[in-house]
Amino acid sequence: MNHDDAGPRLLRLFEGHRLTPAQRRIAHCLVQHAGEAAFLSSVEVAELAGVSQPSVTRFAMALGFDGYPALRRQLREFGSPETVVQDEVGEGNEEEAPNELQRAVLAEIAHLRRLAGTLTDPKPVVAAARLLSVSRPLPVLGLRAAAAQAAGFSYFAAKVHPDVRLLDEGGSMLADRIERAAAAGASALLCFALPRYPAELTEALGVARDAGLSVVTVADSAFAPAAALSDVVLAAEVGTSLVFDTACGPMMLGRILLEAMCDEIPGAEGRLEAFEVSAAAREIFTD
C-alpha cells in the first residue's frame, strides 16, 4: 500500500460510520500506521491503539465487515490502483486534504454548507422561534455531549429572554425541574440532542410532553430518538472524523434559532442595550 495515499483512502473507508470513541482510536491508529496497516494482526492493532482485541473485531463489524480478517483483506486491496482522495470545499472546487486533521475541518465545512442549503426555506426555524419566544419561562435541555450546546444557547438567550432555565444535569431532579417550569407558565422546551443519546433525555422529553409543553429539538439528524417526542426538529450534522464528535453545525443552528427569536421577543433590542450599558458601567469586559 502506498503510504502517501493510504491515509486518505483509509479515512474514506471510515467516513459515514457511527463509531464509538474507542473505535475511533482504532481508526486513527490504522491511519497513523497506514503503510503497514494491511499486514497487522488484530492483536497488534489492539496493542497499538491501546484497546482490547475484541474491540478491534467490533470495529471491523461496525464498518460492515464480518470480522477483522475481512477488513484486512480490504486494506490490502488498497494497494492496487492508486487514487488521490479529494474533498469538495466549494462549488466545483476541489482541494487535497493531506492529513486527517485537515479532512476533519473540511468535512465540517461541508456540513455547514449543507446546513446553509436547508435554510433556503426558513419556515421551520421561524416556527420554532415563535414557539420558544412566548414561553415564560423557557427551559433549555441538553445532557452529556449536548450540555455545552444548551449552556451556550442559554447564556446568549438570557440577554434577550426574561426567564431562561438551563437543564444540563440528569437524575431524578430533572423531571421535577421540567414540571416546575411548566407550573410556572412555560409553554415550550428547547432540547439539544446529540450522539450518544442519553436514555434519560427521552425520558425527560416524555415528562415535558406530559406536562403539556411543546418541544423544539436541535439534533444531528431528523431521525434522532428525540425526534419522535418533538413538535419541531431542526437538524444539523455533527462531525465524526475525530475521536470525539464536533458540533459546529448544531451550534450554528442554535445561534440561527436565537436570531429568529430576537425578531419575535418584544423588547429584545432594549434588553440588549440595557445589558451593554450595565456591562460598560461595571467594566465587565476588557478591550
Image (cartoon, rainbow, N blue to C red):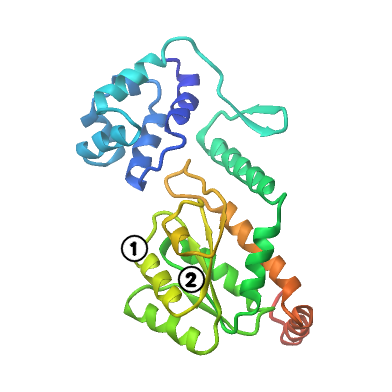
Name the residue rendered at 55%, 35% in the picture: 103
* Percent x, y of residue 153: 59, 69
**Image height check: is 33 above or below 133?**
above
Question: Is residue 75 shown left or right of residue 226?
Answer: left
Disc number at residue 199?
1
Q: Which residue is mark 2?
A: 141
Name the residue rendered at 76%, 80% in the picture: 276
Name the residue rendered at 78%, 78% in the picture: 269
Spatial CA distance of label 1 from label 2 is 14 Å
* Percent x, y of residue 224: 45, 54
Q: Earlier in the sequence, mark 1 or mark 2?
A: 2
Whether residue 287 can be seen here: no
Secondary structure under tag 2 reads: strand
**Image height check: is 42 above or below 193?**
above
Question: Is residue 119 shown left or right of residue 111?
Answer: right
Question: Is residue 260 shown left or right of residue 46?
Answer: right
Q: Amino acid at mark 2?
A: Leu
How crowded is the residue under tag 1: few (<14 C-alpha within 10 Å), some, or many (20+)?
few
Quadrant where the N terminus sits is: top left
